Amino acid sequence: MLTINKLIPQGRGLAAVLLRRATTVELDWDLRQKSRFEASDSAGRQLGVFLPRGTVVRGGDVLVAEDGSLVLVRAAPQAVLVVRHCSDHGSPFDLLRAAYHLGNRHVALELKPDHLKLEPDHVLADLLRQQHLIVSEANEAFEPEAGAYAAGAHAHAGHGHDHGHAGHDHGHDHDHDHDHGHADGHDSGHGHTH
Protein backbone atom coordinates (compact mmCIF):
# COMPACT_ATOMS: atom_id res chain seq x y z
CA MET A 1 0.00 0.00 0.00
CA LEU A 2 1.25 3.45 -0.95
CA THR A 3 1.11 5.99 1.88
CA ILE A 4 -0.08 9.53 1.21
CA ASN A 5 0.23 12.26 3.79
CA LYS A 6 0.44 15.45 1.73
CA LEU A 7 -2.17 17.38 -0.24
CA ILE A 8 -1.62 20.24 -2.70
CA PRO A 9 -4.88 22.25 -2.90
CA GLN A 10 -6.01 22.37 -6.54
CA GLY A 11 -2.49 21.32 -7.62
CA ARG A 12 -1.28 24.89 -7.09
CA GLY A 13 2.24 25.43 -8.33
CA LEU A 14 2.45 22.16 -10.24
CA ALA A 15 3.28 22.15 -13.94
CA ALA A 16 0.46 21.07 -16.24
CA VAL A 17 2.63 18.26 -17.62
CA LEU A 18 2.93 16.76 -14.12
CA LEU A 19 -0.83 16.89 -13.64
CA ARG A 20 -1.39 15.15 -17.00
CA ARG A 21 0.95 12.31 -15.92
CA ALA A 22 -0.69 11.92 -12.49
CA THR A 23 -2.91 8.94 -11.79
CA THR A 24 -6.44 9.77 -10.67
CA VAL A 25 -8.70 8.70 -7.85
CA GLU A 26 -12.48 9.21 -7.75
CA LEU A 27 -13.82 9.87 -4.27
CA ASP A 28 -17.34 10.70 -3.14
CA TRP A 29 -18.07 13.49 -0.65
CA ASP A 30 -18.39 11.13 2.29
CA LEU A 31 -14.82 9.88 1.80
CA ARG A 32 -13.37 13.30 0.93
CA GLN A 33 -14.44 14.61 4.36
CA LYS A 34 -12.25 12.04 6.09
CA SER A 35 -8.59 12.61 6.83
CA ARG A 36 -7.79 8.88 6.90
CA PHE A 37 -9.06 6.46 4.27
CA GLU A 38 -8.07 3.85 1.73
CA ALA A 39 -8.72 4.01 -2.01
CA SER A 40 -7.41 2.71 -5.35
CA ASP A 41 -6.03 4.99 -8.04
CA SER A 42 -6.41 4.66 -11.83
CA ALA A 43 -3.22 2.53 -11.97
CA GLY A 44 -4.75 0.04 -9.53
CA ARG A 45 -2.44 1.01 -6.65
CA GLN A 46 -3.85 0.76 -3.12
CA LEU A 47 -3.56 4.13 -1.39
CA GLY A 48 -3.48 4.68 2.36
CA VAL A 49 -4.32 8.35 2.91
CA PHE A 50 -3.27 9.93 6.23
CA LEU A 51 -3.87 13.69 6.15
CA PRO A 52 -3.96 16.15 9.06
CA ARG A 53 -7.22 15.88 11.01
CA GLY A 54 -9.91 18.21 9.66
CA THR A 55 -8.56 18.16 6.11
CA VAL A 56 -11.27 18.12 3.44
CA VAL A 57 -10.23 16.80 0.05
CA ARG A 58 -11.76 18.59 -2.96
CA GLY A 59 -12.03 17.61 -6.60
CA GLY A 60 -8.93 19.03 -8.29
CA ASP A 61 -6.70 18.59 -5.24
CA VAL A 62 -3.49 16.61 -5.71
CA LEU A 63 -2.34 13.96 -3.26
CA VAL A 64 1.42 13.36 -2.98
CA ALA A 65 2.49 9.78 -2.26
CA GLU A 66 5.54 8.78 -0.22
CA ASP A 67 7.36 7.83 -3.46
CA GLY A 68 6.77 11.34 -4.86
CA SER A 69 4.07 10.28 -7.32
CA LEU A 70 1.02 12.49 -7.75
CA VAL A 71 -2.62 11.44 -7.60
CA LEU A 72 -5.26 13.86 -8.94
CA VAL A 73 -8.55 13.75 -7.03
CA ARG A 74 -11.81 13.77 -8.94
CA ALA A 75 -15.16 14.23 -7.22
CA ALA A 76 -17.00 10.99 -7.94
CA PRO A 77 -20.58 11.20 -9.19
CA GLN A 78 -22.98 10.36 -6.37
CA ALA A 79 -26.68 10.57 -5.57
CA VAL A 80 -27.70 14.19 -4.96
CA LEU A 81 -30.83 16.28 -4.86
CA VAL A 82 -30.86 19.20 -7.30
CA VAL A 83 -33.10 22.08 -6.21
CA ARG A 84 -34.33 24.77 -8.62
CA HIS A 85 -36.91 27.51 -8.33
CA CYS A 86 -40.17 27.05 -10.16
CA SER A 87 -40.58 29.75 -12.80
CA ASP A 88 -44.38 29.27 -12.80
CA HIS A 89 -45.04 29.72 -9.08
CA GLY A 90 -42.01 31.43 -7.62
CA SER A 91 -38.85 33.43 -8.08
CA PRO A 92 -35.09 32.97 -7.67
CA PHE A 93 -35.58 34.42 -4.17
CA ASP A 94 -37.22 31.10 -3.18
CA LEU A 95 -33.86 29.41 -3.81
CA LEU A 96 -32.09 31.97 -1.64
CA ARG A 97 -34.61 31.39 1.16
CA ALA A 98 -34.12 27.62 0.86
CA ALA A 99 -30.32 28.00 1.08
CA TYR A 100 -30.77 30.10 4.23
CA HIS A 101 -33.03 27.53 5.93
CA LEU A 102 -30.86 24.57 4.90
CA GLY A 103 -27.78 26.42 6.17
CA ASN A 104 -29.49 26.91 9.53
CA ARG A 105 -29.88 23.14 9.68
CA HIS A 106 -26.15 22.73 8.88
CA VAL A 107 -26.95 20.84 5.68
CA ALA A 108 -23.94 20.50 3.38
CA LEU A 109 -24.87 22.52 0.27
CA GLU A 110 -23.30 23.10 -3.11
CA LEU A 111 -24.34 26.53 -4.36
CA LYS A 112 -24.74 27.27 -8.06
CA PRO A 113 -26.15 30.43 -9.67
CA ASP A 114 -29.40 28.68 -10.64
CA HIS A 115 -29.65 25.68 -8.30
CA LEU A 116 -28.59 24.03 -5.05
CA LYS A 117 -27.28 20.51 -4.50
CA LEU A 118 -27.51 18.46 -1.33
CA GLU A 119 -27.25 14.84 -0.28
CA PRO A 120 -30.50 12.85 -0.56
CA ASP A 121 -32.92 13.36 2.33
CA HIS A 122 -36.62 12.68 1.73
CA VAL A 123 -37.73 14.89 4.64
CA LEU A 124 -35.81 17.89 3.29
CA ALA A 125 -36.96 17.10 -0.26
CA ASP A 126 -40.61 17.23 0.89
CA LEU A 127 -39.98 20.46 2.80
CA LEU A 128 -38.41 22.07 -0.29
CA ARG A 129 -41.29 20.95 -2.52
CA GLN A 130 -43.74 22.56 -0.08
CA GLN A 131 -41.85 25.81 -0.70
CA HIS A 132 -42.70 25.48 -4.42
CA LEU A 133 -39.20 24.42 -5.40
CA ILE A 134 -38.42 21.75 -7.97
CA VAL A 135 -36.44 18.88 -6.42
CA SER A 136 -34.96 16.22 -8.67
CA GLU A 137 -32.58 13.34 -8.11
CA ALA A 138 -29.30 13.18 -10.01
CA ASN A 139 -25.98 11.36 -10.01
CA GLU A 140 -23.34 14.11 -10.08
CA ALA A 141 -20.16 15.29 -8.39
CA PHE A 142 -20.88 17.01 -5.07
CA GLU A 143 -18.68 19.89 -3.85
CA PRO A 144 -20.45 21.60 -0.95
CA GLU A 145 -19.35 24.97 0.37
CA ALA A 146 -16.53 24.79 2.90
CA GLY A 147 -18.16 27.23 5.32
CA ALA A 148 -16.64 30.33 6.84
CA TYR A 149 -15.08 28.54 9.80
CA ALA A 150 -14.19 25.17 8.26
CA ALA A 151 -10.57 24.05 8.47
CA GLY A 152 -9.03 24.70 5.08
CA ALA A 153 -11.75 27.16 4.04
CA HIS A 154 -9.06 29.68 3.08
CA ALA A 155 -7.33 27.16 0.85
CA HIS A 156 -10.43 26.59 -1.25
CA ALA A 157 -12.08 30.00 -1.14
CA GLY A 158 -10.34 30.99 -4.37
CA HIS A 159 -9.71 34.59 -3.39
CA GLY A 160 -6.08 34.30 -4.44
CA HIS A 161 -4.17 35.74 -1.52
CA ASP A 162 -2.32 34.31 1.42
CA HIS A 163 -2.96 35.39 4.99
CA GLY A 164 0.51 34.31 6.03
CA HIS A 165 -0.82 31.46 8.16
CA ALA A 166 0.04 28.57 5.82
CA GLY A 167 -0.61 25.22 7.38
CA HIS A 168 -2.38 26.60 10.45
CA ASP A 169 -5.94 25.93 11.54
CA HIS A 170 -8.17 28.90 10.77
CA GLY A 171 -10.72 28.20 13.47
CA HIS A 172 -10.07 31.64 14.98
CA ASP A 173 -11.07 35.14 14.08
CA HIS A 174 -8.53 37.59 12.74
CA ASP A 175 -8.69 40.06 15.62
CA HIS A 176 -5.08 39.81 16.76
CA ASP A 177 -5.20 41.71 20.07
CA HIS A 178 -3.00 39.98 22.58
CA ASP A 179 -2.88 40.15 26.36
CA HIS A 180 0.84 40.17 27.10
CA GLY A 181 0.55 40.08 30.90
CA HIS A 182 4.05 41.47 31.60
CA ALA A 183 5.15 40.73 35.16
CA ASP A 184 7.48 43.75 35.41
CA GLY A 185 4.60 46.25 35.05
CA HIS A 186 6.24 48.09 32.13
CA ASP A 187 4.26 49.09 29.09
CA SER A 188 5.20 46.86 26.20
CA GLY A 189 4.73 49.61 23.67
CA HIS A 190 1.77 47.83 22.09
CA GLY A 191 -0.76 50.34 23.42
CA HIS A 192 -2.29 47.79 25.79
CA THR A 193 -3.27 48.67 29.31
CA HIS A 194 -1.82 46.24 31.85
Image (cartoon, grey):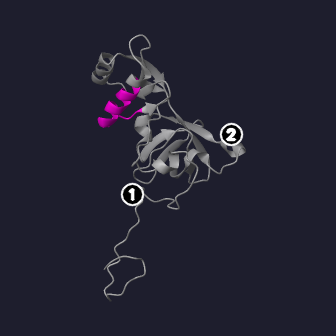
Magenta-span inclusion, residue 103: yes
Nearer-the-camera pick, 118 or 185: 185
User: In the rendering, at what x and y percent does residue 51 appear?
Assistant: 46, 52
The quadrant in which residue 92 appears is top left
Work out whether 98 lies above or below 55.
Answer: above
Disc 1 is placed on an element classified as: loop
Tell me the kind of residue under disc 2.
Arg
Q: Residue furthest top?
A: 88
Q: Residues within 10 Å of mark 1 (few under 14, many from 20)?
A: few
Give the distance between the C-alpha atoms of the residues marked 2 and 1, in whole angstroms: 38 Å
> Going 44% across and 32% down the picture, which residue do you hit?
110
Magenta-span inclusion, residue 86: no
Work out whether 102 lies above or below 22.
Answer: above
> Going 58% across and 49% down the picture, which residue do you hit?
160
Residue stretch rendered in magenta on the structure: 95-109
Nearer-the-camera pick, 29 or 5: 29
| Residue 147 at least partly seen | yes
For the C terminus, the quadrant is bottom left
Tell me the kind of residue under disc 1.
Asp
Residue 173 image label? 1
Q: Earlier in the sequence, mark 2 or mark 1?
A: 2
Q: Decide: marks 2, 1 in contact (CB < 8 A)?
A: no
The residue that disc 2 covers is 20
Nearer-the-camera pick, 158 or 194: 194
User: In the rendering, at what x and y percent does residue 66 appear?
Assistant: 56, 54
Residue 45 image label? none
User: In the rendering, at what x and y percent does residue 165 appear?
Assistant: 49, 61
Disc 2 is placed on an element classified as: helix
User: In the rendering, at what x and y percent does residue 126 appear?
Assistant: 29, 18
| Residue 1 at least partly seen | no
Lateral position of residue 51 relative to residue 61, left or right: left
